[in-house]
Amino acid sequence: MFNRSRRNLASWFTLSMGSILLIFAGILYYQESIQQLEVLDLILYKKARVITASVRYKDYQGQKRVFLKHLPVLGNNPPADSEIIYARWYDTKGQLKHYFGELTQQKFNQKFAYQTLKITNNSGVSSQVIWLREITLPVKYKGELIGYLQMAMPMNRVQELLNRFLLLLISTILIALGITSLTGWFLSGIAMQPIHQSYQQLERFTAHASHELRTPLAAILSNAQVGLLASMEDSASKHMRLEKVAEVAKSMNTLIGNLLFLARRTGRLTPESLKNVDLNELLAELLNSQSVKTAAEHLNLQSDLPKSPIVMCVDAELISLAVINLLGNACKYTPAGGMVELRLFTKYSQAIIEVEDNGIGISAVDLPHIFEQFYRVEQHQKNSANSFGLGLAIAQQIIEAHGGHLSVKSELGKGSVFQIKLPL
Ligand code: ADP
């Protein structure tokens, strides 16, 4: 699926870049052909001017007449310019008076003009198509119109140049397309990476979630079945089984709650959920809550909160949940008689909440993974009946949604410090 999307992305990229290149090449080719045509027209004009410079217009038997015999190409001398295919002289009324080269039947327009013509040269068995550029030049003598010179040159030099230019353009486009498709493939790979990662994460999440849900469900089922098998009179056994079912269902409820939380709360928080909260007061309330007191009854729970309030715009409920998760872990993974401390202070325009314990600690091997969903340290499992490896992932998600950062320092056998940094 990802390879197909990557291929699609790369092809669309190449296609769009290719179209842009083609349009660009088309414009370049058009500009070049216009330029080459202008050069040819200039040559044609200059040649025509050279020819017309020798026209004589004199009195002959009382009438003004045009004399063409001294003209190059059209005159008595043989043409020195082999590039001229034909040259024609028309009088002021548009009547053909003299010509050199081929004579084709075409309409004569009495005005200065350039024209591109296509003629077919039938030599022997094969016929050849030749493109010509023709000029029609009105000739004046002392301001008076005395006739028109029309002449044509072949366009093969221009065509050759344009063909060479076209070849260069095509090869450049092909190379550019090759590079574009490689770049497209590479870029689409980069673009697909986060999608691929999220997909893998989702797959992992679903696999873990179903695995975690299957275990308590199996426990509920087996307890219910054993309870059903017990005799009607054995109410003690039935009661015990029901208690087990209730206990497992409770933990399942917690797990489903956690899963829903992780699935729903992605990205940043909405502005409506944020309110100005005094963190000092919030943490003090947490320490006094019954759940924290129960969790820490076997420990020495201390706190170091500042005297003055630290007011921040946060979602109080979520921040409490993150701190409760950290405090809960600290209590869970610290043996009886140990110490757990909750601190709050500000540093470099950040509010910092620290939860420190002198419990069992986390090894360097497990430390990089503990924020991953469903990750649990194997050796700690006896300390945690109701642990799914989601508490830290939830805490991290909450803190990051507030634009903050959650980090940990821990040493096996010595204890851990979890630190929440929130921008003020
Ligand atoms: P759990 O529900 O298993 O506690 P968490 O995501 O909260 O899930 O924690 C992940 C793992 O990190 C726990 O299984 C535990 O092994 C380890 N851990 C978390 N906090 C502490 C702590 N304060 N001391 C030692 N280990 C801890």
Image (cartoon, rainbow, N blue to C red):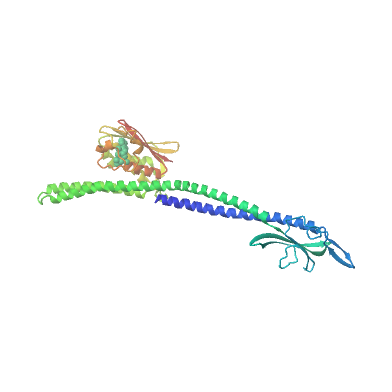
In the rendered image, residue 372, in percent from the top left (x then y), is placed at 34, 41
**Residue 30 visible in the picture:** yes
- Residue 386 image-quadrant placement: top left
Residue at (54%, 50%) from the top-left corner?
Answer: 174
Where is 155 relative to 295, above or below? below
Residue at (38%, 41%) from the top-left corner?
Answer: 279
- As drawn, the residue found furthest toward the top would be 414
In the rendered image, residue 389, in percent from the top left (x then y), is placed at 30, 42
Horizontal side of 142 relative to 377 (left or right) equals right
Where is 50 relative to 301, above or below? below
- As drawn, the residue found furthest toward the left would be 233
Label tally: 0
In the rendered image, residue 204, in percent from the top left (x then y), is placed at 33, 46
Horizontal side of 333 relative to 168 (left or right) equals left
Residue at (56%, 52%) from the top-left corner?
Answer: 21
> Dividing the image into 4 quarters, which one contains the C terminus?
top left
Horizontal side of 393 relative to 162 (left or right) equals left
In the rendered image, residue 131, in percent from the top left (x then y), is placed at 67, 60
Where is 312 relative to 167, above or below? above
Using the image as rendered, state which of residue 100 and residue 326 is in the foreground: 100
**Residue 267 visible in the picture:** no
Ligand 1 falls in quadrant: top left
- As drawn, the residue found furthest toward the right would be 62
Horizontal side of 116 relative to 180 (left or right) equals right
- Residue 73 image-quadrant placement: bottom right
